[in-house]
Each structure stands twice: as C-alpha cells, then as structure tokens.
Amino acid sequence: MSSMMKAAVFVEPGRIEIVDKRIPDVGPNEALIRITTTTICGTDIHILKGEYPVAKGLTIGHEPVGVIEKLGSAVQGYKEGQRVIAGAICPNFNSYAAQDGAPSQDGSYLIPSGLCGCHGFKATAGWRFGNLIDGAQAEYVLVPDAQGNLAPVPDGLTDEQVLMCPDIMSTGFKGAENANIRIGDTVVIFAQGPIGLCATAGARLMGASTIITVDGNDHRLEISKKMGADLTLNFNHCDVVAEIMKITQGRGADSAIEALGTQATFESALRVLKPGGTLSSLGVYSSDLKIPLSAFAAGLGDHRINTALCPGGKERMRRLLNVVASGRVDLGVLVTHTYKLEDITAAYDLFAHQRDGVLKIAIKP
Amino acid sequence: MSSMMKAAVFVEPGRIEIVDKRIPDVGPNEALIRITTTTICGTDIHILKGEYPVAKGLTIGHEPVGVIEKLGSAVQGYKEGQRVIAGAICPNFNSYAAQDGAPSQDGSYLIPSGLCGCHGFKATAGWRFGNLIDGAQAEYVLVPDAQGNLAPVPDGLTDEQVLMCPDIMSTGFKGAENANIRIGDTVVIFAQGPIGLCATAGARLMGASTIITVDGNDHRLEISKKMGADLTLNFNHCDVVAEIMKITQGRGADSAIEALGTQATFESALRVLKPGGTLSSLGVYSSDLKIPLSAFAAGLGDHRINTALCPGGKERMRRLLNVVASGRVDLGVLVTHTYKLEDITAAYDLFAHQRDGVLKIAIKP
Amino acid sequence: MSSMMKAAVFVEPGRIEIVDKRIPDVGPNEALIRITTTTICGTDIHILKGEYPVAKGLTIGHEPVGVIEKLGSAVQGYKEGQRVIAGAICPNFNSYAAQDGAPSQDGSYLIPSGLCGCHGFKATAGWRFGNLIDGAQAEYVLVPDAQGNLAPVPDGLTDEQVLMCPDIMSTGFKGAENANIRIGDTVVIFAQGPIGLCATAGARLMGASTIITVDGNDHRLEISKKMGADLTLNFNHCDVVAEIMKITQGRGADSAIEALGTQATFESALRVLKPGGTLSSLGVYSSDLKIPLSAFAAGLGDHRINTALCPGGKERMRRLLNVVASGRVDLGVLVTHTYKLEDITAAYDLFAHQRDGVLKIAIKP
Amino acid sequence: MSSMMKAAVFVEPGRIEIVDKRIPDVGPNEALIRITTTTICGTDIHILKGEYPVAKGLTIGHEPVGVIEKLGSAVQGYKEGQRVIAGAICPNFNSYAAQDGAPSQDGSYLIPSGLCGCHGFKATAGWRFGNLIDGAQAEYVLVPDAQGNLAPVPDGLTDEQVLMCPDIMSTGFKGAENANIRIGDTVVIFAQGPIGLCATAGARLMGASTIITVDGNDHRLEISKKMGADLTLNFNHCDVVAEIMKITQGRGADSAIEALGTQATFESALRVLKPGGTLSSLGVYSSDLKIPLSAFAAGLGDHRINTALCPGGKERMRRLLNVVASGRVDLGVLVTHTYKLEDITAAYDLFAHQRDGVLKIAIKP
C-alpha cells in the first residue's frame, strides 16, 4: 500500500479537483476504509459553488462504500478486509446530544471544558465527512468513532444497491418517519429529486395508502410511481393545493413532506395539511422562511413541523441494509451513471446541470 | 324560571352590551347550564375590538362554571342541580377529527355529505361558545354534545378555584404537554400573561428542573415565580437569547413555550432552542410569521414546532379539576377582580387596558 | 318493510338458531342497517360453545356490511340508502374512556352517578354487537352511537372486499401498530388464523423488513406469504425459538405478535424478543398466563407487553377502507366460503371444525 | 499514590470482605476515579447471599461518587481532579442496543464477529460495575467508556445529595417515566423501599395528581408522603385493590408502579389498573410470574406492561443532577447511616436486616 492517494478536494468556489494526499494515520477509535464506490450529493454542489463554506483543500463527499483497510487499536468486532459502509453523518454516540436523542447534532468531543464541564453542542456537528474532516470522494477515508459507525454490508449486495444508504435513503426515510405516518394516511411529498423519491419510498413502506407526489419534472414524477406514488401532480399544470383539497374531499393531507428547501414547497406543504397534521421538512433552506397566517390557522391548528438531519450510525445503516436485502425497496434504479474518480469533475458538471436524466452517479476510485 | 335572561352580546366593533335574550330550548344531546361564574378572555378583547369577527348579537364568553338547569333527553349520568363546568372548546367527539386525535378541530356535524360522505373538517371548529354559538357571559348557556362535555365539579372547590379550567389552565398545560418536557429539562416560557403563567405551572408540574420565564412586566414575572419559575428575565433589561445561552452553558433550552402570539416571542423561542429542541406555540398570531434561517439551522436542526388549540371535553376537565383538588397548583390567585354580569362593560374596560394589576376577572350573573 | 326479521340467536350452549324477531325502533342517536353481508368470528364459536356467556335470545355477530334503512333524528351527514359498515366495536366516543385514549373500553352511558359523577368504566364494554346488544347475523342491526360509528363504503368496493374491516383487519393491524414497528424491523407473528394473517399484512404495511410467521398448518403458512411473510416456520418441524435466534444472529426479534391466546404462543413470543423489544398480544386468553423468569430477564429487559381490543369508530373504518381501496392489501382472499343467513348453522359447523380450508365465511341475509 | 487499594470483594455466598487489590491501569477510553462516597444496593444483598452469581474476587458496588484520578488518552473534555459520578449502568453507547434505544442492554464490545458481523446483544449487559467488572465499593474504580459515562457534579452539591443519582434515583424515575404519566393521573406505587420512594418522587415530578403508595411498613409510608404521596395504604390493614377501586370511584388507576419484584405486588399492580392503563415494573423478580386472567381482561384490556433496567450515561446523570441542584427533590434524606469502607461488612449486616430504620448507607473509603 502506497502512502499516497487520490482525493477530490475543494480548491475554491467553482473548482473541485483531484489531488494527491497522504493516506491518514489511524487513531485508536478510527478505521481506514478503502473506497470502492461513492457518489455526489446536492450538498456537494452547494460546496462546489461556494454557497456552503468548507476549508480549502478539504476532501469532499460523505457517502462511503468500501472495505476496511486498517482498524484502530480500540475498535473491536470487525475484520480488516470486511465490506462496510458508514453513514454520511457519523455521530459521536458518547456526546450529550446523542444520549439526549439527537445524535446527528454532535459528532465532536472538542468541547471547551470548565471545571463542571460545558454541555454546549452545535447543530449539524454530526456531519463530519467532507464538512469538518476529509470525506469519501477519495481512494481512502478515515472513519471517526468507528466502533459506532462501521456497518457491515450483507453478502450478495452490490455497491450500487447499498450506495444510497449512507445519505439519501436515511434522509428520505427520516422524512417519512418524522411525518407521523399511520396506516391509511394520505401523504404528499413535495419535490421528487433523489431525497424526495426516497421519502416517497419511505412513506409507502410505513403504510400510507394515498401517496401524492409533486414536482415540475414529468420524468421524476414517473419514477416516483415506481417508488410508491399513487397520484402525481405537476405543479406546472395544476393548482397543487386546490387539487389536493379536492382529492381529500376537503379534509387535507395527514402529512406533507418537504424535500427541496424553498419557500414555495414549504408553504404548499403547510397549506395542504389537515388541522392536526404534520409537516416533515427535509430541505436545506437558503433563506428565511415565511409561515403564512392562513396556512397556519393563526397558530391554532394543532399542527406539527418537524425538521431533520440525516440519521447515521451502524444500527441505522444495519436497518437500511436489511430493507435493501429484503427487496422491499430497490433504490439501485436511482444510480443512473458511473464515473471513475479521476473523472469526477465531469461527473460534477453533469450532476450540477441535471443533464441526461441524471439522478445519482456512482464514483469508482 | 323566567323565559328570558341577561346576556353580554357583541353589538359592533367597540361595543359589547348586556341585552335580554330568550333562554334557549334544550335538544336531546344538549344541556342548559345556569352560570354562577364566568370570566373574560384575551380573545374576547379581539372580538370587542372587531379584530376577530363574530356574528352581531352573539353572546360572548367561553368559560362556564355553573349548575345544570335542564338535561337533554338523551344525556345520561348527570342530575339537574349538579355543579359542572364545560371546556371553552366543546368538541364533537363523534367527529372524524376527534377520532383522529384532534378533537378541538371539529365541533360540528354540519358537514355537507355526498353518497360516500365528505370528510372535510375545519380548523378550530371545536371552539363553539361565543364564536359559533351563544356563549357563557350570560345567565344561561346551552352546552352542545353535553354527554361528552359536562364535567362535574368535585365538592369543596369554589367557583374561583375552577374558573381557569375551561380555558387558560387547559391551554397553558397543553403548552407544556406539547413541549415534550422530560425530567431535568430546561424550559423557557415567553410571556407571562394568564396563559403563560399556566404554561409555567404546567412545565413545573411535568418535571422541568430549570424554568425560565420572560416578560417585560416585573409584576407578572414575580407571579411567575409562584407558578414555578426558577429564573425570570425582563426583556427590557437584558438580551434574553444571550442570557439563556449563558445560563445553559451554550447548550440551549430543551424546549421553549410561546404564549403571546408575536414575531418577537416566536423568534426568540426558536433562537434559544438546542438542536433537537421543541418550540411549543400557544399564541394566536395576527400576521405572517418569519422563521429566520440561522435560528432554524437551515432546516437541519432536528427541531419541532408544535401548535395547539385548547383541549376540551369532560375527561380533560376531570383531570384539571383533579389537579386543582390535589392542591398541586393554585390558580385562584390569578383571579384579581370580581364584577357583576350587569357591570361587564366596565370589566371589559379594565381587562382591555390591563389596569390595576388585573389578570383574570370573575363575572357573576 | 315488514316489522319482523330473521336473526341468528344464542339459544343455549351448543345451539345458535335462526328465529323471527321484531325489527327494532330507532332512537335519536341510532341507525338501522339492513345487512347485505356479515360473517362468523372465532369469538362467536366461543359463544356457541358456551365458553363466553351471553344472554339467551341475543342475536350474535359483530361484522356488519349493509345499507342504511333508517337514521335516528339526531344523526346527521348520512343518507338512507347509503352503503355503510360499522366496526365490531362501537365505542361511545363521549365516554371518559374514549376521551382518555381507550375508546374500545367503554361503549355505555349506563354508569351509576352520584352528585359528583362516577368515572368507572368497564374493560371491553365498547364491544356491544352480539355481546351486550343484538348483533349483525340478522336481516337488520341497530347501530348505537351511529354518528360516531357509521362508515360509508367507497364506491366500487364489494361487500367481500370490506367484510374484514369491522373486526379482523382492525384487530390484526392494531397488533402491528401495538408492536412499535419501525423501518427495518424483524417481526415474528405467532399463529396464522384470520387475525394473525391480518397482523402479518399490517406488519408488512408498516415497514418491517424481515417478517417471520409461525403456525402448525402449512396451508395457512403458505397464505401468510401472500400477506407479506418473508419466512415461515412450522412449529411441528423445528424449534421455533432457536430458529429465530439463528435467523437474527442472536439479536432476537424487534417485536413479536401473539395472535392465538395460549400460553405456548405467548411464551414463545416473549422468548424470541430482543432486550428492549415489544410483545403485542392479540389473543383472547382462556386461562392464567405464566411469564417465565428467564424469558423476562428477571424484569430487567426493557421489554414491553401491549394488549389490545379491536379499534372501532368511523375514522378507523375510513382508514381501513382507504387501505382496501388503495389495493395495498387484498383481504378478500380470506373469504373462502359463502352461505345464506338461513343456513348459518351449517356455516357455524364448518367454521368451528375448520374444515375445507375455511378462513372466513360470507353470510348473506 | 500507592499501587494498591482497599476493595470489598465477593468471596463466597455469605461473605463479602475487604481485601487489597492492585489499582488498575487506565486504557485509552477509560478513567480511574478515586471514590469519595458509595453505597450498598439491594442487588448487592442478592450477591452477598449468593442468589445473584458473580465471579469470586470481584469488587462489588455500582454507585460511584468521586474525583477523576486519571483519564484515558482518548477521553476529552474532562480534567483530573474534577468531581464526577457515573451511572450504575455504564452503557457502551457505540453498541447496536444503545443506538437502537436500549443502551442499558449492552455495555460490551465483546461480540463474536463473523464476516458480516454478529448483532447479538445480551440483556442487562450494560450493568458492568460489580457485575461484569470491578465495582465501586473500593478506593478506586475504573470507568469503562468514560467519554459517555463520566458526569461532572455541579459545585455546591454534597456527596450525599448526589449519591442516589447513579442507581435508585435513575431507576425510580424511570419507573415513573415508563408509567406514561400525564397531568392529572392517579398513580399507585407498590413497595416503598428506596427504589419505590424514588418512583414516588418521580411520579410527583411528572404531574400525577393522586399518588397512592402501598407498603407494609408505616415508617416507609410516612417517608413516602415527603416524597409526594397523597394517600398511603398499609396492606396489613386493608384490602389494597378494593380500597383503590373505591378511591378512584371504580375507574382504576391510570398507572401502577411495581417496585419490589414479587408476585403479590405485580398482581396487585395489574388488578388496580384501569382498562388502557400502564403497569411499570421495576422489581428484580426471582421466580416466574403469573398473570391472572381476570386482572388482564383476558388480554383485551388495552393494557401496557413495561419493564426497565436503570438508565445510565452522562446525559442521564446530568439531568438527575439538575433535578437535585434545582431543589425539586431532596433524596439526601434517604441516607440514614454512614460507614467507613473498612467497616462495610457491618454496613451490609445492617442493610440486609433492615434494622434501625435504614434506607441507604453512605460508605466512605
């Protein structure tokens, strides 16, 4: 094994490039993974454009599929050579936030301590790969808190089949879980990009019996039917809110999942809700949001608004891998293209411009 | 018993007056209550000012304490002459909304039906007294769906002791219940009017161990200590958000309860929350709300925002009456003044202008 | 319309017979339904055998599908001639129990009241048809609390398609709901009679990814695959507990659903649970149960044991009818035989002896 | 610092003795605590009697209060010399069980692994001190997974004030948390030893408004009033079940907490429950349990039975320490005696025979 590797790093706004980097040393609670497949996420595009700031020279990417190359001295129960994934979010399960029910919100021990300790934790700090530490678009990635974050891949599953588990499947399913779905519910999912499609699959999996998907792209709406949609609405061709009220006989939807991160989708999601309904928000917003008084019943509608960051950890991954292995959901169909790691700038270009029906791209080091 | 009674009715914006009205007939599922004590609510002031529209001639008021005068033919298990209260919100427990977990959101059978039924329900429709039907600021009030809404008053409790149960105790406690409070939590309550004070009492009752109340009125902050506050903050004298971050060592509050209905309180409530925290909103807002991006962690903070309308029904009232009877909470101290029904316009004037340290006024027909 | 009807009544242990009865009068909150299809339940066999005592002369049966013949004067939003079902359990939604979250546990106003009321309620009192009042194996049935219990049947669904909704679908799905199923769970269902098969369908609907069914009858295990089972175990051919531990790599099942009502199924359900797992019990037991110390981790296993009575009410029925209409689940396949009401004694004989692969029998007046 | 320390070890049934032991080395994820105060638990008596088997020579005790003597190389955010406690249960928060919501059920990495990993976990394996590894009745104790388990003690609290946090306060409060308590509930706690007294305090803290305690010892019942009981029942002087039914007007209790571990308390707890009620079980049972058919409504009562093992971890301890610091609950009164570590055999004798009104004994190395 050479001491150097190829890695896609953020150079400056508009530029992510392949460079040579030193393969990192492995601390007692870490593991080094040789990446066999990874992918590009919408968040990476924000990083590429400079909209989401990361350190120059940081390796990008947070969706690792690979093989254990080296285990830290304190990590037990795994073998070098074992196929694994790790979540996009690698929580520190020893943190206050994790023990308090919000593992994705803290991934770091690096808390200034006074005599009696400081309990502060930082939103989204569980997202470390390609954000706070080097990420997965490389030949190797170092997994922090490996004991809690390495998830063995069941035999017989391909890299492509499990490639969605670390991020979009975990996020999309969380959108469904946060929507308080009960058997017989009517659920509307706004936006059918990769995350929204996974939310649709999640809503189907949890027992919603009327699933309505909304997008402006007929191709994506068509794919949403494969993921479980009963009805699709193209917002270019109808008044979505009025249509949903008609479909539900004036009752409104039991829950609505927002999967884009815009005022329009958030607001429509609120407007279609029944009194007592739940808005599950997945999008990464880039500006202040407005809650219209009428959509909110002036605060008297018994509404719930739940937000989420992608759940991680080996138990979450184990469950998602089970779902894949069971054949309940086939997200492999979302992998529309394959590129070599060395060609990743071309892959970024394709993905950023959503050309050629691209949904997700497999990147192979 | 005469066939006529005195009632405070909405005449036009700025004018609520005592008039003579016919005592209503009692349908099979209704009950007629002779009011012994009632009170004025902040919502009534909105009605008085014309900010919340109701029909001209409607009797106002939704907090009835009294005695059963006459029972409908289908109502069982009660006696005429029995002391009872009814919730401010009288749900129709046979409605779809009630069976679906949101009883306050539907109080009416009056749903247009097609062959296969229409399931539409209307936000806040469970609020009927002084909104959709004649209310409690009168000598008599007709309770709809009486079988589900008449709550016997335990012996030994005065009218003043139970006067808060129908509305502000039920609402304030719901604010605490909606805040997902767990033992050892830090909870902040924004605004310490009657509802906020009850939310403070509710948070205390549910096991919060650090309760921080926020208001601009030192007198109300002082009373909040009696209701259970550990710390009080006057927003005129400090930067509330910064102060709470300091108190919690950077962690943020586990939950925040909004009890006023303004952008400032809503926004501050969001800003003091830990990632993973819950904002429980009680206020009746009068304009669109803004969710600032930074306070919301761009949608990635695992936050919850829950709104509520006051819960009603005889079981809810039974529980609140138990709390009063147990001596856990003494809300009688919130009754600062007493007026005769015939003097209610003076009471409205006092209450609307918050003179003389008024919190709640007992009105006696 | 004649004033007389045919009805199957309990005469004495071992004897249910068709007799002529007066068609009942309709009170203000009731509705008279003309039955088009009904069925026989396992509980009816207990009644037939005298194991479950009911009044002599009572009409048996609690699964009504029919047409509204006459509406009570206070019932609104329905039309005579409309196709409806009602749940096997017809809760009184105005009761304390219903408002307290357990509607199936109280169906009666008939509570002795003192001055301050008596809040007592009686387990299973929500089950009225064929238990406390005349039931559905007749030409007509009187639905109590009709406003909360009449559920319109969507156009295009046959009687056979909706015949499982009133009881076994509602019960079986409740078994899955009570099992705290999360995406990716391993769930074991013990016994695959009609209720167990519905529990299997419910577990599948809620996102379990490894569903294991257990029975001694290979034919029923085969049908369980159609309902969603991934793996089936015949307890005559293997050590079920050991097998499940092997399948789950020693982890145990996330939840287990008991669908028969015997010590053996209850105990096995407990033995296959992971620490922290949930046992959802559906069976009607006929003797004391034993909890073996070892299966219970001496009380330290963070286990949950949840029991249930079939949920009823028009909202529950609406949701189940939605599931049927959506095509998610086809329970029509469980209807294996059809008999005329006048031949019901032959139907009872077939059903009691489980001859001819019988699962459920459609009874047609 | 010497290399040797005093420790109370299990020698053989009937014999726990003070011996000299080597002070252990500190691994990267561990911390060495110098004990300033610890105590004896009912479980330790089971160990002493040989009823609960542990290895000969094991140091007993699981309630450490002390000072950090030495931190492992990978443990961050603490200082040597800092006052801390650790829970009786020290979960491995990286385990599958912990990530799956049951941290107390797994404290060990020591899982045999195949290529795809083995997910098995063992009930109660989170209890390590004085069970699987050396415990706290010694001059020093080694805390495993220290990053997740060391909890700083707030300034100003004495050892005695925080001595209940590691075990009986955490366990007793969990009993209340597992009881699904809501504002206005009636809760019965069976047995008022230290755990039961803490459960009473927990029920009070969570908003129960009628708290009934049951024991055969009037002294303990008297103390239970200080912990929050409204009513006490001595089972030697009344029929407890009948009395509770009378108090609740036939309704039954909303929940019952079992805090002893016997058939009699378990069965009575079930018998006093309302349909739909919750039995929260805390006791460590020593033989099979019987569920009487009638108490269980034949499985149709919508009952819940929840068991628990004491929760641990630094966040749980932080919350309990907050409760103590807030003055909400004063459990220091439960510390009735103080002994030196070298006199621990006398302390065991006192505690085992419950002489002299003993509740808990502070042990001082």
Image (cartoon, coloured by chain):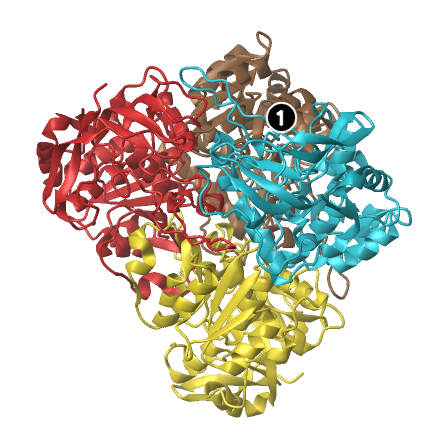
Chain colours: A cyan, B brown, C yellow, D red
Query: Would residue C359 be found to the left or right of residue D35 on screen?
Result: right
How far across and how far down the image is residue C220, in percent?
53, 79
As drawn, the residue found furthest toward the top would be: B237
Task: State which chain disc 1 sits on.
Answer: B
Q: Which residue is mark 1?
A: B270
Q: Which quadrant of the view contains residue C69? A: bottom right
Q: Amino acid at mark 1?
A: Leu
Residue D233 at x, y percent in the picture: 22, 44
Q: Does dot 1 land on a helix, a strand or a loop?
A: helix
Residue D334 showing in the rendered view: no
Mark 1 burial class by Cα count in 10 Å: few <14, some 14-19, many 20+ = many
Q: Is residue D196 above or below residue A158?
A: above
In which quarter of the view is residue D24 placed? top left
B228 up-or-down from C269: above or below: above
Residue C110, given in percent of the width and then of the height, sits at 44, 61
A319 w.r.t. C160: above or below: above
Nearest the camera: D294 or C136? D294
Residue at image coords 23%, 51% = D240
